[in-house]
Structure formats: C-alpha cells, structure tokens
Image (cartoon, rainbow, N blue to C red):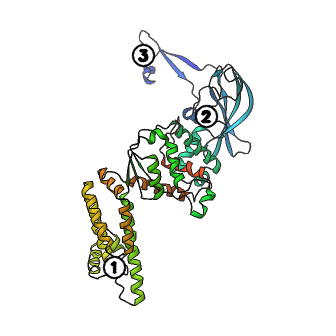
Amino acid sequence: MPRFALWEVTSPKLAQRLSIPRLEGLERFLVEIRRRRFRVMELITIQNRCHRFRGFVYQRAHFSPDKKSIEVALRPRRGSAAVCSRCHLPAPGYDQLAERRFDSFPCGGFSSSLCTPCGAPTVAAAAMWLSKKSPWGDGKRILTKAYMLFLARWARRLSWKETAESFRTSWDKVFDAVEHVVTFGLKHRVRGQVDAVGVSRLSDRPRRHAPALGGPRKNHGSFRGFFAVIGDELASKIGFVCSDMWEPHLKVNGEKCSEELHIPDRFHIVAKMTKALDEIRAGESRRIASEGGMPVLQRSRWLLLKREEHQKTEQRFRLRDLLRYHLKTVRAYLLNEAFQQLWDCNSPAWAGKFLDDRCRQVMRSRIEPMKNIARSLRQHRELILNYFRAQKLLSRGVVEGLNNKAKVTMRKSYGFRTFCCLELALYHSLGKLPEPESTHEFF
C-alpha cells in the first residue's frame, strides 16, 4: 500500500476550499495527502527523548511475565563499535553474553528495568576479554546512572529508608546510589585556595557507643585526619584557624598551623561565661530555698542570660527589681555585662589592657566559677587578642550552622551503623559536590 496518495485537482475552487497553495508555473494543483495512523505515545518514545545512548537502540517495551514491572529491551546499533570497559577504546566486535538487567525509573506505579545483552570486546590494549562498557551503568551496579542520580537527590531531602520505601526499592540500592554520586563528586571536585578554616566538634554517637562505630573519636587523631585529607600543600596556605579553646584543637593547630593566626571563637568565650553565671544562679537559688528565704531568683534564668536588646518590657522591669538585691548572682551578672564591652574594642593593645583589668577585678570577686573563667582567659590571652588582630572579621557561625545540619542529617536517619555510611551521608548533604551529568532533569 503506497504511503502517499496523489490526486489531480483541476478546479481552483476545490483547491481554495482545501487551503492548498497554488504551485507557480503549474496550471493544475496537486494535493498530497498523507495517511496517518493516530497512536498514543509509547514508552520507547519517552525513553528516546529522555535517555538516548550512543551505539544502542531501544528495541521494545513490554510487561514482565508476572505483570508487575516493565522491561525495556536494548540492542546494539548496527555498525557501531563496542567500547572496552577497561581501556575505553573501541573494538571491532563483541560476543553476545548473558542478558543483564538494570533498574530504571518507575513508570505509572510499575518498576522498570533495562534488559541489555552484554558484549565482551577484544581490544589489543586491554590484552584480555572484558565486558563491554555500558553508557547507562557503572561497573557491576544494577542501577542505571540516571536512576542513581534520581535516588541520590531524593536521599538528600528524605532519609535513606524513606527514599527506599517511596520508590519501592531497597536501602542497599539507595546506599549504592549515594555512594556513586559522592564518589563522582570527590573525584571531580576542585579545591581552591583556603584562607581560613573553622573547626567545630561533632558527636556521632554517645561516648559509650563511640568505639563500636568504628570511626575517629573527638581527639587529636580525628583533627589530624582533617589535615591528612587536605594535604600539606593546601594546609600551608591557610591564614586563619578559628576554633574553641579545646586542648586537642590548640595542640594540633600548633603542630600543623604554627605560622597561621589561631583565633578563638567569640561565641565559645561568651558561652563559657554564661554557663558560669547560670551555675551561680542555680546554686544560690537552691541555697535560698533550703534556708527558707524569699525565692527572688525563681524563674529568673532568662532574665539574666538574655541580652538587654532581646528582653521584653516586662522582663526589663523584673530585672531592675532583681538587681536591687545584694546577691552573688547579681554581682556575677554585673561582671559578665562589664566584660561584654571587650568586643567593642578595635585595637589589640586596648583590648589587652581591658582584658587584664577585668580579669583582675573578677579574681577579687571571690566567686569561684567566675574566677575559673578569668584564669582560662589569662591562659589564652594572646589567642583572644588574635580576634582583634584579624579585625573582628572571623567567627565560627557558618561552621556551627553546618554542625547543626550534620546533626539533623544523623537524627533524620536515627543514626548510622558504620562510619562509612555516616561519612557518605555528610558528604552528600553538606559537601556541595559536583554531580554527574544527566540527559534529563526530573525536578
């Protein structure tokens, strides 16, 4: 049966009614009518639009024998050379081996898989029989690259278990997908120059379970592992290191970054003083209650810990009444507020003089928790002054935010059994690593 039918139209009125343009130089009109078959869009058409692979052709799509999944068959394109999976060189031919199945995207509530015959090209450079390189897979993984990227992106928003349940797959396959994306990102990431580093501690599990996790604990070795990852060349270019006054941080910084400017975090210092103030308030409140006195410190915790600019009007009146009492808590509060003026200094010299005067005043207060803070500040005097030498531009705010996101990642999955899973999850959610290219964006 001919594909096209030709009719001669001798009447101009008929040609005008059919909206047929008149051909120049001809007195007659030719009407070309194509016989069309109206069909619904096929799955192969969608696959060709989303995922086309060079050297392969989609052959057919059909249901599996149990009618629970869709199978899409691929075949090598005629005349295309196979590519060796080891040396990545084309080969003249390959033998047909057993069929392999790769899990692909679900379609209409059905799981789908690519059914492909694997070849074994003979390449002189490889000097052995190797499997044909498949552009849709990665090694021996049974997931397509696009499907792994799809699962990995959802695993960043949901927990791995929730991702597996949502797309009717297993937790192990979601782990393989995340591992594939993270491995690709670590391989293709570009490390630029690092000028400043912020250090914060992260507890992956309680102390009693830390040895069972198999990962590094919060000690000297875990911090040295960071410098082992970035290398000596990149570590030598670091100009500033911002951390708390924890002993392992100070020791490793002295070993690895002896020439850099080590800056203690301002938030850490303020938090130490706030904790000492709260400890004094709680102890004095218990003492007054045991002696049967008037509970003037009851419900006064946030009156003393909040900054003045964050207090409500009612809290300001209550604080004014509380400051009239001659209490140890009131004296500690006044010493703490006076110390906050340190952060208004701009010169390291004036900041050092102010710090010495305040520490001398606190040591005479006979309030032991505040005296412990003063001793610690005297011990780390030069480190505190580095904050002003850096023009008060550096803090650990961004690092603490990442620390919180890391805790959310672990809490969302209710913890991980091995340190390898935890490391992959943190790289995947916080690393901003480059992702493999995809032929189609799904969201």
Q: Could you tell which of marks 1 and 3 lies nearer the N-terminus?
A: 3
Q: Is residue 65 left or right of residue 312?
A: right
Secondary structure beneath label 3: loop
Q: Residue at x 35, y 67 (%)?
A: 374
Q: Could you tell which of marks 3 and 2 lies nearer the N-terminus?
A: 3
Q: Residue at x 45, y 59 (%)?
A: 246
Residue depth check, mark 3 versus mark 2: number of the one nearer the observer: 2
Tell me whether the residue at label 1 lies in contact with that at label 2, contact meaning CB atoms closer than 8 angstroms: no
Give the number of the disc on residue 136. 2
Tell me whether the residue at label 1 lies in contact with that at label 3, contact meaning CB atoms closer than 8 angstroms: no
Give the number of the disc on residue 328. 1
Secondary structure beneath label 2: loop
- For label 3, the residue is 22
Q: x, y (%) of residue 421?
A: 59, 51
* Dot 1 amino acid type: Lys
Mark 3 and mark 2: Cα distance apart in space = 51 Å
Give the quadrant of the N terminus.
Answer: top right
Q: Could you tell which of marks 1 and 2 lies nearer the N-terminus?
A: 2
Residue depth check, mark 1 versus mark 3: number of the one nearer the observer: 1
Residue 140 visible, this angle: yes
